[in-house]
Image: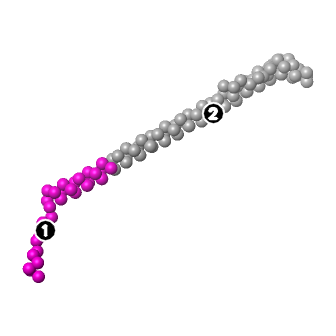
Amino acid sequence: MRAIAFDTLEFVEQLKAVGVPDEQAKGHVKAFATAMRQVEESRVDERATKRGMTELKVELKRDIKELELRMVIKMGAMILGGVVLVMMVNFLWPVPVQYVSDSFF
């Protein structure tokens, strides 16, 4: 977290110089410092959220690539299985070929 330089004593002195009572000036400085701290914390939270989203995107891309590879492997296995099945059927039950001699015509 980046620190913001803020001199509270100088701020109180500036408020007193324009006529703000001492207790009221201290209250203004305290409220302002609290507001600045909250703004900085929200910025840190926002950056953390963005970083978390970036990590999530990277993780999702990796998961999609992994799923794509698994799908390609399964598709290849199904095609190979289909080709083997057709070859086995053709080997076990061959199509009968009828021999026709030339003398018949």
- Residue found at x 60% / y 31%: 48
Tag 2 secondary structure: helix
Q: 8 or 61: nearer the eye?
A: 61
Residue 20 vertical placement versus 85 (above, below): above
Instruction: Answer with left or right where residue 75 lies relative to residue 63.
Output: left
Q: Camera-side residue: 36 or 91?
A: 91
Query: In the visual, does 44 lie left or right of 36?
Result: left
Which residue: 52% across, 39% down? 57
The image quarter in which residue 14 lies: top right
Color theme of the render: one colour
Provide the residue span drawn in magenta: 76-105
Position of the N terminus, as image quadrant, is: top right
Amino acid under label 2?
A: Glu
Whole-percent x and y of residue 44? Answer: 64, 29
Q: Is residue 73 magenta?
A: no
Task: Estimate the spatial distance between the alpha carbons at disc 2 and disc 1, rounded to whole Å.
Answer: 77 Å
> With 53 as the anchor, is 3 left or right in this view?
right
Q: Crowding near pointer 1: few (<14 within 10 Å), some, many (20+)?
A: few
Farthest residue, direction right: 18
User: Mark 1 falls on what kind of element?
Assistant: loop
Q: Position of residue 104 (x, y in %)?
A: 9, 80
The prevailing secondary structure element of the residues shown in magenta is helix
Residue identified by numbered label 2 = 46
Q: Which mark is residue 80?
A: none
- The reply to whether the magenta stretch includes residue 103 is yes
Residue at image position (41%, 46%) is 68
Q: Earlier in the sequence, mark 2 or mark 1?
A: 2
Q: Nearer the viewer, residue 57 or 66?
A: 66
Which residue is pictured at 80% across the width and 19% down the height?
8
